[in-house]
Amino acid sequence: MIIIKGVPASSGIAIGRAYVHEDDELVVEKRAVARVNLKDEVKRFRDALRMTNSDLDAAEKKVLSMLGRQHAKLIDAHRLILKDPLITQEVPARILREEINAEYALSQTLEQANRNFEKIDDEFFRERRHDLFDVGKRLIRHLVKHTRKSLSDIKDPVVLVAHNLYPSDTIHLRESEVLGFCTDIGGKTSHTALLAQSMEIPAVVGLSDVTRQIKNGDIVIIDGDRGLVLINPGPEALDKYQKLKRKEKQDEKNFERVRELPSITRDGRKVSVMLNLDPREDIRPHVLLKPDGVGLIRTESIYMNRTVTPSEQEHFEIYTLLAGAFAGKPVTIRLADIGGDKLAALGIGDLDKEANPFMGLRGIRLFLKHSDLLKLQLRAVLRAAQSKNIKIMIPMVTTISEVRHVRRVIDEIYAEFIKAGEPLMHKPQLGIMVEVPSAAITIDGILPEIDFVSIGTNDLIQYLLAVDRVNQHVAEMYDSYNPAVIRIIHLIVQSAHKKGKEVSVCGEMASDTVTAALLVGLGVDTLSVPPRRYYKIKHMVRGLSFAKCSSMAQQALLMASGEDVRELIYKALDETI
């Protein structure tokens, strides 16, 4: 048996025989085009654009019928790519300038774009390059008249193994017999991963060379919760996962029953379960879940797929809609966590390229440098916050001075409204996202300036362990069970509780049933999770004993290795905490 660890992209367990999908190689050769024929070459490219648009029409129809309007926005993103000057202007210009064939001009333009994407620090935006390549491949196929083998042709139940899957591949998975999939590359926030999550297809991505290690017909287990792929498992592992899968199915039937029930442990400890939301999503189905509130609104998505910054009124209308939809419950708006590359793409920055953008100008650092952006978003939030359930969260805080700066801007805005004769009557709570070790270690000093704390475990773990979780060379070192992670969360929770402030967790640790139990034991007050994980986590909370979770957490704090912590927790959960 071989076990490989990758990036958990979509939860659940899949067991089946492998189908290794070989990516069709589109060989694009450079061909000189006579000057007299260049206009015809550009026309050939324009025709391919029209045919690709027709493809998108068909894909949109499929996504709408299968997943609803929320995910049809993916097609909007692809349409925007087709309208991007990089495609509509640069490719024809390259054809004319270099006197070359259209497919080669396009491939060179995509390669240049890929180099630019590699420099983006934000994982979410970096993953958007796969959408660009998806559209690019559609165009090239039309140019070279190549028809791709569709995954919808798979008629037997299989675990799909591929170097990469594009969103256009993923939308065929439900109509095929794909039980789960794993890929060499890809990230958790790619559209492929997001579609897999929506279709509830277990998936692990970023496995480096899984297509080389698995052969057609191998028995494969996909553990989408832990990011594990087991190749030709032994009888013991196979039996264990078959039992887990049966339990998973039984649990799913029971999950919805928790909707009307309070989120408390068996021994009466209140642990709120809230939602992480993208404000561009259709929120109506999420309201029906009846969560305890919204622990995280990712406002950076408002800046996506556009060339100008959103207006104050646009922000205001979005936040007002959210506050109304979840009236009477907290709605936590995180100030946009975007990096410098995105700002430059919006045409409002003249930033030099950063040598290490991952630790560069992003989150609140960027907003403090571009105070007009900070003020615009805060004005919109404060206007919407008069409904009284909105809270403000500052991302990527490193020092107390950043918090004080935001406080001063809020005070300035209130003074401006008073001067204009339109005083704001309510000041929302202000909190920070702790995702940098310096903020965690100095949390004692920051707490008097804020009302609540939210721990962004994804980035905190990366910065604490100096591991890029999407870097295939070190991703296996990203470990939520590392004692350093547990001790720093314990430090934050204990410090906050001493000052009477609540702590939530909105990273992946909160939506994993195993690590979420550890967070409950560490005293975390709120778990904020994606909507698809809501029932499962709430069901899990209601089945826990807080006293036993606390005892487990105290033991974990004394452990020396992640393996020891993992063993401790799994053993404790097997004994039904």
Image (cartoon, rainbow, N blue to C red):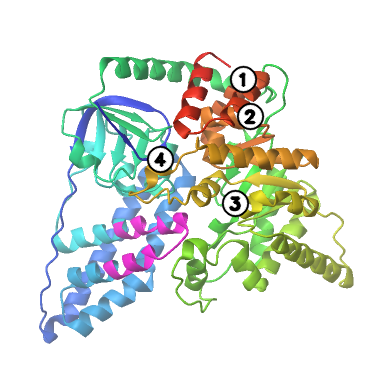
Mark pair 2, 4: CA separation: 24 Å
Q: Residue at x 17, y 76 (%)?
A: 41
Q: Main secondary structure of the magenta part?
A: helix
Label 4 SS:
strand
Q: Nearer the viewer, mark 1 or mark 4?
A: 1
Asked if 455 appears above or below 360 in the picture, the reply is above
Let me know if residue 89 is in the magenta part. Answer: no
Name the residue that disc number 2 marks.
Answer: 520
| Residue pointed to by mark 3 | 437
Marks 1 and 2, how far apart at CA: 9 Å
For residue 140, side relative to residue 360 (left or right): left
Residue under label 1 = 544
Q: Quadrant of the C terminus?
A: top right
Residue occupied by mark 4: 9
Nearer the viewer's eye, disc 4 or disc 3?
Answer: 3
The amino acid marked with disc number 2 is: Val
Please state which of the two labelled residues, at mark 2 or mark 4, is closer to the viewer: 2
Residue at image coords 52%, 46%: 461
CA–CA distance in space, label 3 to label 1: 29 Å
Q: Earlier in the sequence, mark 1 or mark 4?
A: 4
Q: Secondary structure at mark 3?
A: helix
| Magenta-highlighted residues | 111-133
Mark 2 surroundings within 10 Å by alpha-carbon count, few (fewer than 14), some (14 through 19), many (20 or more): many
The disc labelled 1 sits on which kind of residue? Leu
